Image: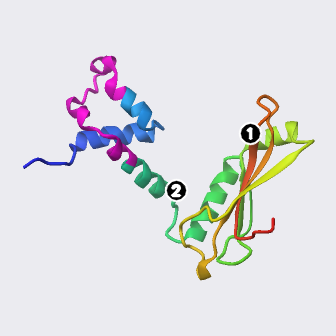
Amino acid sequence: MESTRIPKVINDWIIARFDLGIGWKGIHRLLASRDLDATGVVVPAANAVLYDHVNYLIKTRLTFQARRDRDIFVSMSLWQLHLDRAGWHTYAPVLTNSDDFLFAIQSPWQRKMMLEHGKTMIFIDTTHNTVKNCFLSQGRKISLYTVLIRNPVTGKGLPVCWAFTTSLAI
């Protein structure tokens, strides 16, 4: 009988690479590297590592790492606090299960780009029903609003802020 599980040492190796920010393409390149023998961390059974396993780990670990509390609104409040401490700009006047729900974020780099290059034109792109999570009652859904400016280098849209909201009238 053949076992379909990979050894724990391989699983741990994949998780360590993922935690370093390496995705499937990077992990695949590492596994195919001729220099792998010289690293001292050779995993002979590494040929058993498949995309599906790495993809599963990425999805499950990202969900686990993103959720800071079982209550989604407490989790978002904790994220707001974390982002504010990291120098990001957040706006979340209503983090409750209501029609007024709004959570907006902007990185320091995005703010800099907006202030330097967003004086003439600002665009708003909306994607409705973007979040499949059912955390709001009465079937309310979340829309993602992306605020963009014209990229001075490429001439294309450059995202400078994101907002998640239940409102369709921003």
Residue 49 lies within the magenta run = yes
What color scheme is it? rainbow
Q: Magenta segment, which residues? A: 30-55
Is the residue marked by circle 2 packed among few (<14), some (14-19), or many (20+) residues within 10 Å? Answer: few
Residue ID for mark 1: 109
Q: 38 left or right of 96?
A: left
Residue ID for mark 2: 66
Determine the image quadrant of residue 40. Answer: top left
Check disc 1 and report its element: helix, strand or loop: helix
Q: Residue at x 52, y 61 (%)?
A: 68
Check disc 2 and report its element: helix, strand or loop: helix
| Of 69 and 104, the residue lying toward us | 104
| Of 40 and 7, the residue lying toward us | 7
Quarter of the rendering occupied by the C terminus: bottom right
Residue 126 lies within the magenta run = no
**Residue sticking out furthest to the left:** 1
Between discs 1 and 2, the one toward the N terminus: 2
The answer for how far apart the CA atoms under marks 1 and 2 are is 22 Å
Callout 1 amino acid: Trp
Determine the image quadrant of residue 29. Answer: top left
Q: Residue at x 76, y 30 (%)?
A: 154
The image shows residue 58 at horizontal and vertical percentages of 42, 48
The image shows residue 147 at horizontal and vertical percentages of 78, 51
Q: 116 left or right of 105?
A: right
| Of 140 and 69, the residue lying toward us | 140
25 w.r.t. 81: above or below: above
Callout 2 amino acid: Ala
Q: Residue at x 75, y 40 (%)?
A: 158
Determine the image quadrant of residue 6. Answer: top left
70 w.r.t. 35: above or below: below
